[in-house]
Amino acid sequence: MSLKDKLLSSHIVFQDSLDSDSPIYDLRGEAIKTFEAEGFPTKKDEAWKYTSLNSILKENYNIFPSKDAPLDFNDIKQYFLNDLDTYKIVFVDGTFNAHLSSTTHDGIDVCTLNSALTKPKYKQIIDVYFNKIAKEESLTSLNTAFAKEGAYIYIPKGKVADKPIQIIHFATGAEGASMLQPRSLIIAEENSEVQIVERHQSLTDKRILTNAVTEVYAGKRAMIDYYKIQNDRLEASLIDNTEIEQHRESVVSLHTFSLGGNITRNNLNYYQKGEHINSILKGVTIIEGKQHVDHNTLVHHIEPNCESHQDYKGIFADSATGVFNGKVVVEKEAQKTNAYQSNNNILIDDKATINSKPQLEIFADDVRCSHGCTIGQLDESALFYLQSRGIAQKEARALLMYAFANTVLSSVKIPQLKQRITKLIANKIGVNIGFDI
Amino acid sequence: MLTVKNLHAGIEEKDILKGINLEIKAGEVHAIMGPNGSGKSTLSSVIAGKEEYEVTHGDINLNGTSILEMDPEERAHEGIFLSFQYPVEIPGVSVTNFIKTAINETRKAKGLEDMPASDMLKMIREKSELLEIDRKFLSRSLNVGFSGGEKKRNEIFQMAMLEPKLAILDETDSGLDIDALRIVANGVNKLRSEDNAVLLITHYQRLLDYIVPDVVHVLMDGKIVKTGGKELAHELEEKGYDWLKAEVNV
């Protein structure tokens, strides 16, 4: 049975197991129909031209993995930001793990989508926000069809989350290859602030496929600072769909650090619904072997006087492949838009590949839009400079790669996170010299 | 200390150096002057080991050992330092961390442990005072947003930290105002000793008022066409290079 057929038949079982009074019962039913009609994307779809899911769709995934996989905290401690006081929302094989988590309802809500979907007091919020931003396409619909659990964060008007929030999804493979579909909803109301660090982490050599959807709503003047750490095992693939709706004068910054995994596809969509909005999209990709990372971004400028800043850096070794497909749409009404996009890549080996495709669709006439894409090798003169100071070629290369990625790293606002990512990058590059934090 | 014998070198089949002979002894300061395009910077790059240049003939010895087969970092470990005309910017790596890395990489190559942190700090303090560099400067990203003068001062600071046997200063005076020039020259003069040597590459005589050379060479069209004492530099300043061109027929 194909994965699609398996998902379709599993859905019937899934719906039967759930309360038909759920506010999203009908939504799930419609969503599975969309998925049934569209199926998984193929390379024939323009947006998937350079990323094929074929190799990962053949696996016989467990759609509803285990309830209680035993986990020793010492084995997974390394995946947390331990030197930082945070709220934590932790899932193990798609199930919320209260023991590893640290949630709150004190002024802000940091808990699980499952409780928001099942408790009446959240019904109104779910009705207003759930599945309102996500695109109606096959993979997000598939996620909606199985939506049950994930992070739920609600920051009311004028509140500032007193500490960052970590969202971690572990996969144990205890019941073999598994498909996970976490669904998260993040709402920052007017004048609120929140910082989020998210990670998907496999703990197994079994194949893992995650199709995640996160909807992010930023109200008037809200500030959201979001970080995604993608440094997974070689058997784990991730399709990460993040849909962001911004309102007047809000700032949403999202950093994606893609340092490992099998196939990683980031669909990151921003919709600007108000004036004076700032959208910031940054990414560092450093991969080797046969790994594949695809950044597919959209910034939809709908109203006047808004900005967007995209800065993606990629370093590709061996026969790793990268894709950057950055689309900026400026509607006719969106005058005085400032939209910047830059995608710089270094190919370390002859077999490494990057497909970089900026797409600008501009319908307004008074805008400033720029995009630049570079693909190159490390600067030989810079290398010589470092070597002439006694730094061996290997370390000199690492230092230059670090410097190359630094424009993205330097805007990480949580010092402990910056330190952690710096270390991850140093390890990735294969040396550990006196890097700055 | 440094012996260059009949050195021919070029880039992509174009000859730039056409038979250079040079002998620099410990304790000496040599200056190489010459018009633009004469091969001055090529000579410094070839001595430091820049790979894009090909040495087609001749040899370079440091204390009796040929360095031609050595990588740039090995030459640095042997005590060659090149101060760059255009130092490279390294965002995210502070001056302090960079110099620590450079020193400890050199120590590692010699089989030594990392320099103890307290010794390192003491040395950084001493040498930065010598070059009138303040604390804040040391924590800035290497060369990022530095003025011309700051870049050159930082180069000489690195030289002071690395304590090379042979320091090659490539156009260190270019882009410096008189105060920066004085500070840089003062730093170089204080680092001079009986055990090390300095090779100054310059277009103008001005630097040589501050760092007084023992020997001045004139490089033209890839060859040293004249060698003399410090008075040669003054003569060049006065008359320019044209009279020499006529004299040596290039």
Image (cartoon, coloured by chain):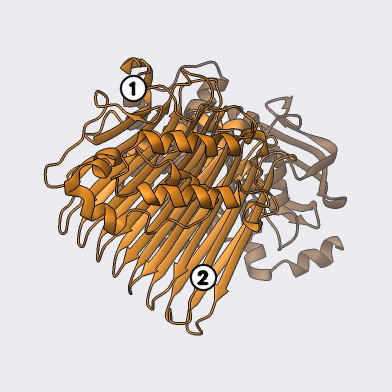
Question: Who's the residue at 43% across and 40% down the image?
Answer: A146
Confirm whether circles 2 and 1 share one chain: yes
Q: Look at the image and give the colour of chain B.
A: brown
Q: Residue B124: which quarter of the image?
A: top left
Chain of the residue displaying label 2: A
What residue lies at 17% left-to-right and 44% top-to-bottom?
A162
> What is chain A's hue in the picture?
orange
Residue A148 higher or lower than A247, as above or below: above
Res. A116 mark: none
Where in the figure is residue A363, as x and y percent of width and height?
53, 80
For label 1, the residue is: A77
Query: In the rendered image, which quarter contains the N terminus of chain B?
Result: top right
Query: Residue B133 at x, y = what percent?
Result: 35, 48
Name the spot of residue B50 as percent of width and height, x first: 70, 42
In whole angstroms, how far apart are the C-alphas of marks 2 and 1? 42 Å
Outermost residue, bottom direction? A365
Q: How busy is the neighbourhood of tag 2: few (under 14 within 10 Å), some, or many (20 plus)?
A: some
| Residue A165 in the figure: left or right of residue B190 | left
Q: Earlier in the sequence, mark 2 or mark 1?
A: 1
Q: Chain of mark 1?
A: A
Front residue of this view, candidates A294 and A208: A208
Which of A144 and B21 lies nearest the eye of the viewer? Answer: A144
- Of helix, strand and loop, which one carries label 1? helix
Q: Which residue is mark 2?
A: A329
Q: Residue at x 31, y 25 (%)?
A: B118
Amino acid found under the numbered disc labelled 2:
Val
B127 lies left or right of A400: left
